[in-house]
Image (spheres, grey):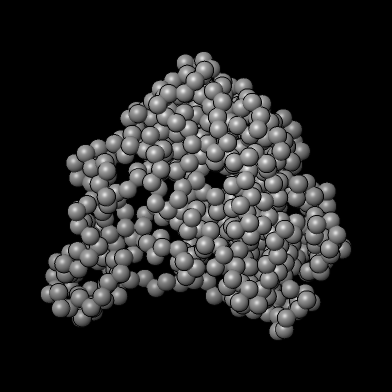
Amino acid sequence: MIRIAGIKLSLDQEPVDLGPAISKKLRIVPADLIDYRIVRQSLDARQPANIHFVYTVDVQVRNEAGILKQTRDRNVTRTPAKMYPRITAGTNRLRDRPVVVGTGPAGLFAGLTLARGGYRPLLLERGGDVDSRVAAVARFWETGLLDTDSNVQFGEGGAGTFSDGKLTTLIRDPRCGQVLDELVQAGAPAEIIYTHRPHIGTDILREVVKNIRQTIIDLGGEVRFNSQVTGLKLKGDGIQGVMVNHGLEINAGVVVLAVGHSARDTMAMFHGHGIAITTKSFSVGVRVEHPQTLINQAQYKGFAGHPRLGAADYKLAYHSPSGRSAYTFCMCPGGVVVAAASETGGVVTNGMSYHARSGTNANSALLVGVTPADFGSEHPLAGIEYQRRWEKLAFQAGGGAYRAPAQLVGDFISGQPSSGLGEVIPTYSRGVTPADLSDCLPEYVTATLREALLNFETKLKGFALGDAVLIGVETRSSAPLRIVRNPGGEAPVKGLYPAGEGAGYAGGIISSAVDGIRVAESIIAGFAPLQEMLS
């Protein structure tokens, strides 16, 4: 096939209008165009008076060789082959089926890859299946009764299930395409394959993870919920199995640790077993809420509200003279701010959008980077205690019951507590209490955020809107630690494979899923598939 880049269509044109544009680009008659598919669709909004879509397409035409030979257009090339890594199975025999701990993106895709290879993995998840988990989360948001094992952080699909379902990533790996293909096969919209900033939305993502689970089961795997790994069986320098719910022992010579970034008790258990863990940098801050119409107007000007554009997003960064940096993260157009606590007595915020992104407000994390030097200790779990400190202070500042402290942007910039709210009505699911966010964030974070808000106003008009709301605190942007592993994905303990965001090797749905695939490939390369169902 032939790949064509840089085809422009106006907002009033539809993808079906690509056919004439392709024919014009290749200088062929329409009858010579056999078929085409969209590889990439992006939005060019750099010039407010000329917002348009830009496409890359793969086309099938008559006389392909002749067209490629004659063209002088650098945007017309032969379509590169889609190459996913091919792994040859090893010869070492497994006495027991592999165990995957956690069913977030890393765990699900490690399990799916192993299942497709004939390894019949057993997946263990401390939280509930999607449906029971949704019920537990709804109960918490309505009543304040927190289930510490099944919540926004824990349960089938991981923390990403209660998010915008963003599928953007900075990593360049052919497995990214493999993840997208699997998601579409499991029920995600086909557009995620080619859109510039793809997202699924929490509503569709819940169905997708259930379908992936069923595929694993159909391939001979097993998934057990409400099954927390509470201990490891170690012998010499290798893993022999895991303990579940403080009682059941499961034998396994291969264990994938894909527990997610909030499994603090599990990390403490790993540390107690002598598993090598190091601290790492992460970020803390707040959620900021604006009217979605303000963001649409700032980004799209006269085209705001156009049906082809939908809810606008943004991505901003600021580098302070102090050496600190602030940035927006996990921006949720038309979304809501959710209560994301997983431990009693702490307030944690996160953002979530449904696929339609039709909510009144836009929200985003507004974060400042912190390093192990800020933690006050060199202990491997010091980052966890650092997170807990600010979460507990936010719980107090919110007045208890998991209400969140909130401050108007205007008050925050001027350094005074908020006594009420303005035109922007916060969406945080447990309700907010007007407060002073300096009571639950370190001074170097609030100082950097004040500078960033003023800087972002110069980049996106209205960002420092006085009535916009800051809601604290967001502390779970990424893992505050890393479980040590070698280039093959194996920890110093033989047969133990840390994976994903919780292990400190990914950030977001796609990179976590890719890391799970890589770890599974390492296992496949070392061991032969199971030939019969093992109990």
Image quadrant for the C terminus? Answer: bottom right
Q: Is residue 345 visible?
A: yes
Of 153 and 323, nearer the camera is 153
Q: Position of residue 372 (x, y in %)?
A: 67, 36
Q: Position of residue 241 (x, y in %)?
A: 81, 65
Tell me where residue 8 sits by quadrant: bottom left
In the figure, 522 relative to 500: above or below? below
Q: Is residue 208 left or right of residue 156?
A: left
Residue depicted at x 70% and y 61% = 225
Of 208 and 475, nearer the camera is 208
Image quadrant for the N terminus? Answer: bottom left
Of 322 and 284, nearer the camera is 284
Q: How many marks?
A: 0
Q: Position of residue 261 (x, y in %)?
A: 64, 48
Q: Is residue 67 left or right of residue 144?
A: left
Residue depicted at x 51% and y 24% = 407
Of 350 and 138, nearer the camera is 138
Q: Is residue 90 left or right of residue 332?
A: right
Q: Is residue 422 left or right of residue 219?
A: left
In the figure, 280 relative to 405: above or below? below
Q: Is residue 505 visible?
A: no
Residue depicted at x 48% and y 55% = 203
Tell me where residue 456 sits by quadrant: top left
In the figure, 262 relative to 409: above or below? below
Q: Position of residue 338 (x, y in %)?
A: 54, 41
